[in-house]
Amino acid sequence: MLTPWRVLDPGTVVVEGDRIAAVLEGPAPDLGEAEQIHAAGFLVVPGFVDIHIHGAAGHDTMDATPEALGGMARFLARHGVTSFLPTTVAAKTEDILAAVANVAACQNRDLGGARVLGIHLEGPYLNPHWRGAQPLEHIRPAASGEYEQFFAWGNVRLVTLAPEVPENRALIPYAVERGAAVAVGHSAATYEEVMEAVSLGLSQASHTFNGMVPLHHRQPGAVGAALTCEGIFAQVIVDLVHIHPAVVRLLVQAKGVRRTVLVSDAMRAAGLPDGSYDLGGQWVRVREGVARLDPGGSLAGSTLTLDRALANVVAATGLPLEEALPMATAVPAASIGLEESLGTLEPGRWADLVLLDEAGHVQLTMVGGKVVYRSDKVPAPGAA
């Protein structure tokens, strides 16, 4: 068992209701008539937390329907994700509002899979010159009359913006005061502009290296700020397409495990065959699992899942799984201020856990004490 900060071999997690009641080292004690899941031969880890995901399994956050979030939640559970932030793209005000309202309506529902934590607003307050796959016609400076509407449901957990746009700066403290983290992304910000934003409350970099000016030794920009500022959590898409394995190593060496956040940035094609898919009203062509705008060719999110991202970061860095695991669990939870609720196996936390086999494949996922995915390799629970 990896908590993930401790290795317990063997160990037992005691669940009462939707919370962890105890984490015990050593052989399982006599728990009377309590239902047991026998995890011998599997590795028990905290559930993964994906704070940057647009869609999966044919669904998208911007569909703004409970069915879409339910489809995403069930797909994610099969890949070890127990909590996630559905993520928007730049769009019309009314379309973003519909997505925010839908997420709010689904946060307290049992979707049969991963838990919806709130929403990640990626845009519309971005730099049009570094838009990537964000729709150009919907990128605009922040206006308080608009973003106050987005915050009206109280469920915005993360905002990605371009801090070099003067109008966007007032949104940073506004968001932080309301419990949201703020990330630099799709931005041409200088190092100095990012550090000014940090002084206002910015604490993350969205998909570091992507959607920002490349690192230059005299103009470090947002990448340089993300690599060197202790106050910034660096999100990274480790599909080995968005960035080279050597750059993955560079990032983890610079930031350390406790400041690196694995994200999928997945779009609706995740889990589906190659083909053409919609992203924010734009066509995306997926070939060999790589999503690009068609036409245009810009990378358009990914088809990545966090179980694959974790395996890829282990391969790229040479870190053992027990050292890499926090980047998919405890660290993303901490990056959005939820370290006291999820991301670790500790008493009082939500009972979100995953069983991995020796190859790192997800065999069982539990969300809030309820098994939402089980492979046929995991024995049915029995009484103690």
Image (cartoon, rainbow, N blue to C red):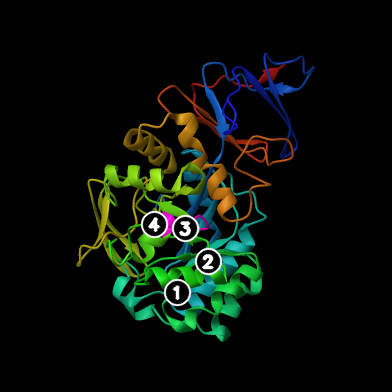
Give the magenta range.
226-231
Q: Which mark lies nearer to you, 3 or 1?
A: 3
Instruction: Give neighbour class at mark 1: few <14, some 14-19, many 20+ (Cα, 10 Å).
Output: many
* Secondary structure of the residue carrying numbered label 3: loop
- Compare residues 90 and 347 and report the one nearer the observer: 347
Percent position of residue 18, x then y? 72, 40
Q: Residue furthest front?
A: 218
Q: Are marks 1 and 2 in contact (CB under 8 Å)?
A: yes
Q: Give the side of residue 4 with respect to residue 20, left or right.
A: left
Percent position of residue 203, x then y? 53, 61
Q: Give the side of residue 348 with respect to residue 244, left or right.
A: right
Amino acid type, callout 3: Cys
Residue 249's place in the image compared with 187, above or below, is above
The N terminus is located in which quarter? top right
Is 140 magenta? The answer is: no
**Quarter-of-image position of residue 181:** bottom right
Inter-mark Cα distance, 3 to 2: 11 Å
Return the residue at label 4.
207
* Secondary structure of the residue carrying numbered label 2: loop
Return the residue at label 2.
202
Lower position in the chain sequence, tag 4 or tag 2: 2
Return the residue at label 1.
163
Return the residue at label 3.
229
Lower position in the chain sequence, tag 3 or tag 1: 1
Q: How many numbered marks are there?
A: 4
User: In the rendering, which numbered label is found on residue 355?
Assistant: none
Lower position in the chain sequence, tag 1 or tag 2: 1
Inter-mark Cα distance, 3 to 1: 16 Å
Q: Residue furthest right?
A: 32
Q: Which mark lies nearer to you, 4 or 1?
A: 1
